[in-house]
Image (cartoon, rainbow, N blue to C red):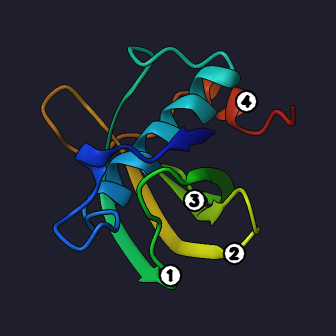
Amino acid sequence: MEKRIYYHDTDAGGVVYYANYLKYMEEARTQYLLDRGIALDMFLYAVRECNLRYRSPARYGDIIKCSSEIKKISAAQIFFQQNIINKADGKLLVEAEVTLVCLTRDFKPAVIPDEVRGRLLTKL
């Protein structure tokens, strides 16, 4: 997923406000699911864990690329590796490990539905 950095994405120093990277990664994960035919109402999930390492800032006007890759799937969890790079020079800006957990409507852990699991394992 590509995204242009606008003024509203930045802080007083002219760089992307650190929490905005979480939004960009959420958008990239959502697009990852949609690209595999997984509608957002096919299962309920939440971020269980998120570990980020900030390497370099993005700035106003930059175009960034956000990637999402599944590293592992357990019965109820999906483990993503996500990177954000600067499109112009390929510089790694942020790297993250994000764990999603599948939930019931009562917000209790649940097994990932077979249809969703099959689509997650599909290579594009």
Q: Which mark is residue 56?
A: 1
Label at residue 17: none
Disc 3 packing (10 Å; few <14; some 14–19; many ≥20)? many
Residue type, mark 3 in image: Phe
Number of other residues with Cα within 10 Å of mark 4, as a class: few under 14, some 14 to 19, many 20 or more: few
Which residue corresponds to mark 2?
91
Q: Nearer the viewer, mark 3 or mark 4?
A: 3
- Earlier in the chain: of badge 3 and badge 4, it is 3
Left or right of residue 49: residue 4: right
Q: Which callout, 3 or 1, points at the residue further toward the start of the chain?
A: 1
Give yes or no for contact between labels 4 and 1 (Cβ–Cβ under 8 Å).
no
Residue shown at 68% from the left, 23% from the top: 35
Closer to the camera: disc 4 or disc 1? 1
Q: Amino acid at mark 4?
A: Gly
Q: Earlier in the sequence, mark 3 or mark 2?
A: 3
The mark that comes first in sequence, 2 or 1, is 1
Q: Are marks 2 and 1 in contact (CB under 8 Å)?
A: yes
Question: Which residue bears the numbered disc 4?
Answer: 118
Q: What is the x, y in percent for residue 58?
A: 47, 66
Q: List x then y, in percent, for residue 114.
A: 62, 27
Residue 80 tag number: 3
> What percent of the width, then of the height, locates residue 122?
82, 33
